[in-house]
Amino acid sequence: MSILFVLLTFLVVISITYMMRREEQPGEARVADPWARMEAPSISRELGFEIPKDFCFHPGHTWVRDEGRQNGRIGMDALATKILGKIDRIEVAGLNRWVRQGQKLMTITREGQTIDLLSPVEGVITSVNHEVVKDPSLVLSDPYNKGWVCVVKSPEMTTNLKNLVRGPLIGPWLHNSVQRMNNLRMTANPAMAQDGGIPTGDMLSGLDPEAQRRLIQEVFLT
């Protein structure tokens, strides 16, 4: 009988401990993502473009900011957001997924059309900005701060950054990109040609599907 009593007591203790841990789990799940907030970058202007300090850009118009310890915060550059004009949905490759530099990292949906964006660095996705997933307009309104998309742990960060557009090359590169975009739009529809200035937004509107495809391929390299 005493053995049975000890066993029952042991089971009760285990049950109470289990329930207490279950009650703690919701609080643990609410632990803040260490990457949830981003320090606002210093912005300068060159050739009419806003250029964030210490950002590097992929030719497919994504950016990465080296956050230290092989961590890179990633987003979409302002020129790309002006070209798209609107974003209905953003889907990021899953957490702990390995992505390669120059391969698909995220998919943008705009008016039923899907557009793949490329990763500026190679590594493992360790965080996703769930605020942007819930409200993609953040990418359009604040692409270099609240509109960041994900964080990638990149063991070869230093090498990857050497393959990107950075420093004094960013302004001329963006200027050249705008010229190419305007030339494509003028070829597709001369009535829509701009004067060569910075796009005001939604450069895809008014273009036929084939012209949109060419513009998307030119901008995002996909």
Image (cartoon, rainbow, N blue to C red):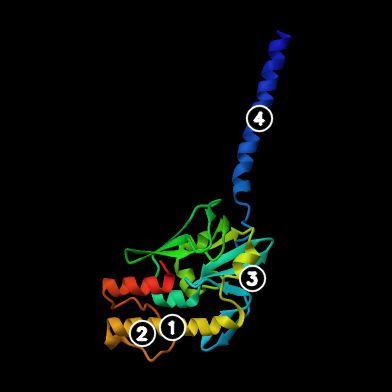
Contact between marks 1 and 4 (CB within 8 A): the answer is: no
- From the viewer's perspective, is 111 left or right of 1? left
3 vs 2, front mark: 2
- For the point 61% across and 42% down, the residue is 25
Contact between marks 1 and 2 (CB within 8 A): the answer is: no
Please provide percent x and percent y for residue 115: 39, 65
Mark 1 sits on what residue? 178
Quadrant occupied by the N terminus: top right
Indicate which disc, 1 or 4, sits on the residue closer to the N terminus. 4
Please provide percent x and percent y for residue 163: 57, 70
Please provide percent x and percent y for residue 112: 32, 63
Query: What separation in Å lies between label 1 and label 4 (alpha carbons)?
Result: 65 Å
Identify the secondary structure beneath mark 4: helix
Q: Label 3 amino acid?
A: Glu
- For the point 62% across and 75% down, the residue is 41
Mark 2 sits on what residue? 183
Identify the secondary structure beneath mark 2: helix
Task: Tell me the crowding category of disc 3: few under 14, some 14 to 19, or many 20 or more residues within 10 angstroms, Cα based.
Answer: few
Quadrant occupied by the C terminus: bottom left
- From the viewer's perspective, is 185 left or right of 43? left
Q: Label 4 amino acid?
A: Ile
Is any atom of residue 37 visible in this view? no
Please provide percent x and percent y for residue 217: 38, 70
Q: From the viewer's side, name the closer residue of 141 and 162.
A: 162
Query: What separation in Å lies between label 4 and label 3 (alpha carbons)?
Result: 43 Å
Mark 4 sits on what residue? 16
Query: What separation in Å lies between label 4 and label 2 (alpha carbons)?
Result: 71 Å
Contact between marks 3 and 2 (CB within 8 A): the answer is: no
Indicate which disc, 4 or 3, sits on the residue closer to the N terminus. 4
4 vs 3, front mark: 3
